[in-house]
Image: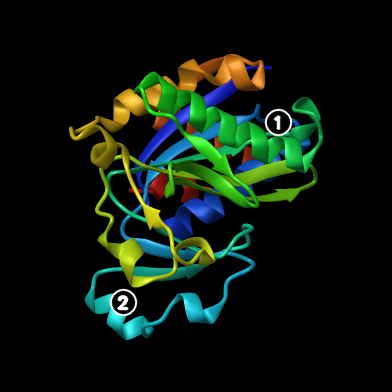
Amino acid sequence: MQISAVNLGTIPYKDCFQLQQKILEQVALGTLSDTLLFVEHPPVYSLGANFHKENLPMTIEEYAKLGVSIEPTDRGGDITYHGPGQLVAYPIFHLERYGKDLHLWLRNLEQWVIEVLAESGLAGRRFAPHTGVWIDDQKICAIGIKVRRWVSMHGIALNVSNDLAPFEWIVPCGIEGYGVTSLFKELGKEVALDEVRQRMTAVIPNVFHNSVEWQGREPFLENLSRLCDTNELTNFH
């Protein structure tokens, strides 16, 4: 069964979280194939299941003045930032088809990003015991997942050309003493998100041993609405 890839464009974090939950149920039922969502989020801090308050040192009101909202979520990990210019990928895959091993799944997500970075001439690396992908001692990609009924949701946030300043206002992923980087910072030039999306789908067969078929945003949401018997999914903007 092929992976269905969909570019949703810019979508609020909370709406995308709810959308992922609906897709997960359909993937678990077998009415949808494994689904890969590509999105951008308006500026937001997502708080993982292992969030520690000291890693968000200012008040909600202070962050609001800086233009960043805050959303709790059920993924693993601590706090991270999402914003325009960052490519977020949510693979909602049934892990029975990918080894049914959470450790292997996380390592495969890391390998996916490492291979994408290699296409740009960058040497991404793992930095145990932390999950994610690093270039030297700077993190370029955060990874956090939630698995239910052996279907994974949430995923990866790869810094492409996003503003890195919001990472300075928190303790990213709860890891002290290390910086954050991006493709723009490392390459010294703009990189189009569409180019990175294409690279990510191109290396999927190498890592996940499956092929990818692109679907249009509106047809995908309309089909999901029918499966879920609701009209609300066609109203995302």
Q: Position of residue 199 (x, y in %)?
A: 41, 21
**Relative side of 198 to 55, left or right:** left
Residue type indicated by callout 1: Thr
Disc ID at residue 63: 2
Query: Tell me, what colour scheme is on the image?
Result: rainbow
Q: Count how many numbered circles sit on residues in the image.
A: 2
> Image quadrant for the N terminus?
top right
Q: Is residue 137 above or below residue 37?
A: below
The amino acid at mark 2 is Tyr
What separation in Å lies between label 1 and label 2 (alpha carbons)? 40 Å
Q: Which mark is residue 201?
A: none
Residue 88 % position (x, y): 43, 43
Where is residue 209? Give x, y as percent: 66, 16
Residue 10 at least partly seen: yes
Name the residue located 26 percent from the left edge and 61 percent from the top edge: 165
Query: Position of 201 compared to 63: left or right?
Result: right
Identify the residue at image location x=31%, y=37%: 183
Q: Which residue is mark 1?
A: 31
Q: Dot 1: what SS?
A: loop
Q: Secondary structure at mark 2?
A: helix
Camera-near label (1 vs 2) is 2
Residue 225, above or below 189: below
Residue 222: percent from the left, percent from the top?
49, 35
| Residue 111 picture quarter | top right
- Mark 2: few, some, or many residues within 10 Å (few <14, many ≥20)? some
Relative to 75, say whether 143 is above or below. above
